[in-house]
């Protein structure tokens, strides 16, 4: 008998007794994804290397307790209502000011105090033509975390041949802002195997949004030409990460939004990452206008992850497809406003392969 493509198992309970489940999806090309209903979290993502040996390439914890801890830096979670930062935790929409949680030095980060990464999502396994899929849904009440409008959200993970596809959808009953993403931390040599400084990265973007203190965009869209943020050709991440550049100084490395060279609405190839030792390749395709490359600067070597491993500084990186940070306060950026009758719909594909050596 063949192994089931989707398997459900218990993952623990919240302090209030709410049960959390883990869904394991098995697809083609040896790819396996385990997703928890708590936070819609990608708990593990097993990918073969150039020799055919699978390893887990995302950071995380062995059980639910780790994800509930204060030290969890959004490992693998769905982020919303608004991924990234909003300056001073406030914005004005249709003439009305809305005040959000200031959970990042007075700024608003990743949806607030009890954001989408901290709720239990309703799950529905699906049998899709492309492969096994899991649809997660959640309703965010009007006024939750300070956001206006009731927002109904679904996120569908589909394990295609050699790829994990993420489709986001949302509707609202009142004008609001919406910017969803996933916060997986990747190390293509295997989680807990060291730093990502020897990984090679290419980002298909000629511009980025520079930041000031607090990592809030200034509103400028600047060329990467002549800066350490130029990844238009594949570059070893460690080559320039500690360069004497104000942008790297603000972030302690890379933690910036790149403005993608995207020319159409279909999922567009925007980034390519190659593991230094494993030969694993991750290609990112998205319908979004931006991607946040974060080089794990705030991992400090004290956080114990799977198997009790200590995760070092820069032990993983994130490639968060998104609209730009602080867009609600920058009308010159592509809009994140969602109104009744409109449907928010974006897609991101994480496509894996191996480098032939």
Image (spheres, rainbow, N blue to C red):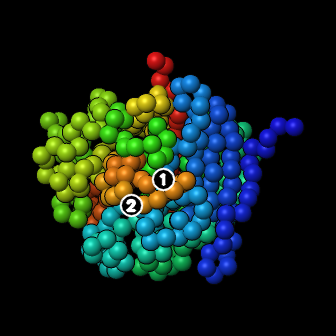
Q: Hey, which quadrant is residue 154 in on the image?
A: bottom right
Q: 161 or 19: nearer the eye?
A: 19
Where residue 28 appears, as percent x and y from the top left, is 67, 33
Asked if the residue at tag 1 contacts the one at tag 2, i.e. Cβ–Cβ closer than 8 Å, the answer is: no
Q: Can you name the residue that lies furthest to the right here? A: 1
Residue 103 in view in this figure:
yes
Q: Crowding at label 1, few (<14), some or many (≥20) Cα neighbours within 10 Å?
A: some
Give the left or right position of residue 87, taking residue 4 as reference: left
Residue 287 in view in this figure:
no
Q: Is residue 247 above or below residue 196?
A: below
Determine the residue positioned at 59% across, 41% down: 46
SS for callout 1: loop
User: Label 1, on which residue?
Assistant: 309
Q: Is residue 349 above or below residue 156?
A: above
SS for callout 2: loop
Determine the residue positioned at 54% across, 58% down: 61
Q: Hey, which quadrant is residue 243 in on the image?
A: top left
Q: Going from the N terminus, do you reach mark 2 or mark 1 first?
A: 2
Determine the residue positioned at 52% across, 36% down: 351
Give the left or right position of residue 95, taking residue 308 as reference: left
Determine the residue positioned at 17% across, 54% down: 249
Q: Hey, which quadrant is residue 197 in on the image?
A: top left
Give the left or right position of residue 63, taking residue 215 as reference: right
Where residue 287 appears, as percent x and y from the top left, is 45, 44
Q: Crowding at label 2, few (<14), some or many (≥20) Cα neighbours within 10 Å?
A: few
**Mark number, residue 302:** 2
Where residue 77 appears, as percent x and y from the top left, is 51, 59
Where residue 88 appears, as percent x and y from the top left, is 26, 74
Q: 99 or 114: nearer the eye?
A: 114
Q: 331 or 305: nearer the eye?
A: 305
**Mark number, residue 58:** none
């Amino acid at each position: 008998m063949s192994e089931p493509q989707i398997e459900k198992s218990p993952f623990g309970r919240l302090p209030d007794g709410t049960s959390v489940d883990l869904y394991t999806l098995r697809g083609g090309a040896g790819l396996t994804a385990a997703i928890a209903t708590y936070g819609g979290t990608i708990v593990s993502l097993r990918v073969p290397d150039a020799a055919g040996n699978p390893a887990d390439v995302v950071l995380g914890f062995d059980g639910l307790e780790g994800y509930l801890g204060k030290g969890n830096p959004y490992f693998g979670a769905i982020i919303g209502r608004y991924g990234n930062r909003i300056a001073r935790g406030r914005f004005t929409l249709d003439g009305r000011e809305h005040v959000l949680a200031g959970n990042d030095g007075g700024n608003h980060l990743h949806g607030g105090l009890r954001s989408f990464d901290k709720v239990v999502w309703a799950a529905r396994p699906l049998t899709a033509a492309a492969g096994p899929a899991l649809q997660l849904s959640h309703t965010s009440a009007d006024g939750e975390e300070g956001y206006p409008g009731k927002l109904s959200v679904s996120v569908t993970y589909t394990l295609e041949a050699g790829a994990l596809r993420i489709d986001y959808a949302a509707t609202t009953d009142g004008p609001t802002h919406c910017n969803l993403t996933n916060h997986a931390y990747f190390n293509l040599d295997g989680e807990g195997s060291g730093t990502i400084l020897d990984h090679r990265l290419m980002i298909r973007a000629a511009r980025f949004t520079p930041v000031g203190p607090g990592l809030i965009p200034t509103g400028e869209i600047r060329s990467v030409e002549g800066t350490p943020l130029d990844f238009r050709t594949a570059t070893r991440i460690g080559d320039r990460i500690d360069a004497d550049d104000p942008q790297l100084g603000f972030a302690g490395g890379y933690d910036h939004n790149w403005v993608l060279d995207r020319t159409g609405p279909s999922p567009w190839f925007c980034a390519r990452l190659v593991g230094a030792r494993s030969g694993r390749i991750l290609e990112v395709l998205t319908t979004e206008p931006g991607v946040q490359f974060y080089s794990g600067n705030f991992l400090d070597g004290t956080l114990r992850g799977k198997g009790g491993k200590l995760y070092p500084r820069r032990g993983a990186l994130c490639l968060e497809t998104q609209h730009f940070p602080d867009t609600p306060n920058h009308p010159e950026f592509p809009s994140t406003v969602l109104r009744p009758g409109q449907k928010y719909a974006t897609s991101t594909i994480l496509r894996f392969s191996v480098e032939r050596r």
